[in-house]
Amino acid sequence: MTADDSFSRIDDDDYPAYTMGRAAELLGTTQGFLRAIGEARLITPLRSEGGHRRYSRYQLRIAARARELVDHGTSVEAACRIIVLEDQLEEAQRINAEYRRTAESANPANPTNTD
């Protein structure tokens, strides 16, 4: 591994840089909570060669959202489902916007003649 490879990982949101203990510490939660959202398949941490869970920054953001919902009284299972639905809605909105841009560029609006 070169120094360039190491530096590129610093900005990689998907690089599994955090151990379970460190992830729980950063989120202010328990390792059990991380296991629970993993069992609910909200996030799937990668495993080190020794079998230890490793989390990426992207996964920590998802876990933080789940913790926020749970802290407001939502069950872990419901929080996971809400996050999945939020993600699906965001993706659908992105696709809709893309279709709209494509349709507008294919059929530009005719300017109104005000003579």
Image (spheres, grey):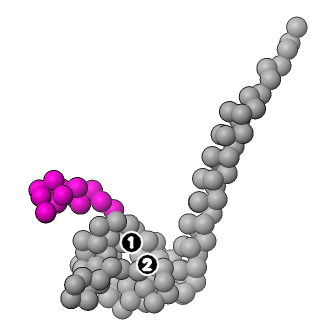
Secondary structure, mark 1, is helix
Residue 12 belongs to the span the image colors magenta:
yes
Write down the residue under mark 2. Answer: 43
| Identity of the residue drawn at 68% across and 46% down | 99
What amino acid is at disc 2? Ile
Q: How crowded is mark 1: few (under 14 residues within 10 Å), some or many (20 or more)?
A: many
The residue located at (24%, 71%) in the rendering is 17
Number of numbered markers? 2
Coordinates of residue 60 in the picture (x, y in percent): 36, 72
Measure the alpha-carbon separation of dots 1 and 2. 6 Å
Q: In this view, does 31 lie to the left or right of 80?
A: left
**Location of residue 5 (image quadrant):** bottom left
Based on the displayed image, in which of its 4 quarters is residue 102 positioned?
Answer: top right
- Please tell me which residue lies in front, 77 or 109: 109
**Residue drawn at x 12%, y 58% as measured from the top left:** 2
Left or right of residue 59, residue 66 in this image: right
Magenta stretch secondary structure, dominant = helix
Whole-percent x and y of residue 68?
46, 75
Bounds of the magenta segment: 1-13
Residue for badge 1: 59
Q: As drawn, which residue projects farthest toward the right? A: 115
Q: Which of 32 and 38 is in front in this view?
A: 38
* Vertical comparison of 86 with 27: above or below: above
Q: Please state, as top left, top right, bottom left or bottom right, where the N terminus lies in the image.
A: bottom left
Q: Position of residue 15 (x, y in %)?
A: 29, 67
Q: What secondary structure is found at the residue carrying circle 2?
A: loop
Query: Is residue 33 at least partly visible in the picture?
Result: no
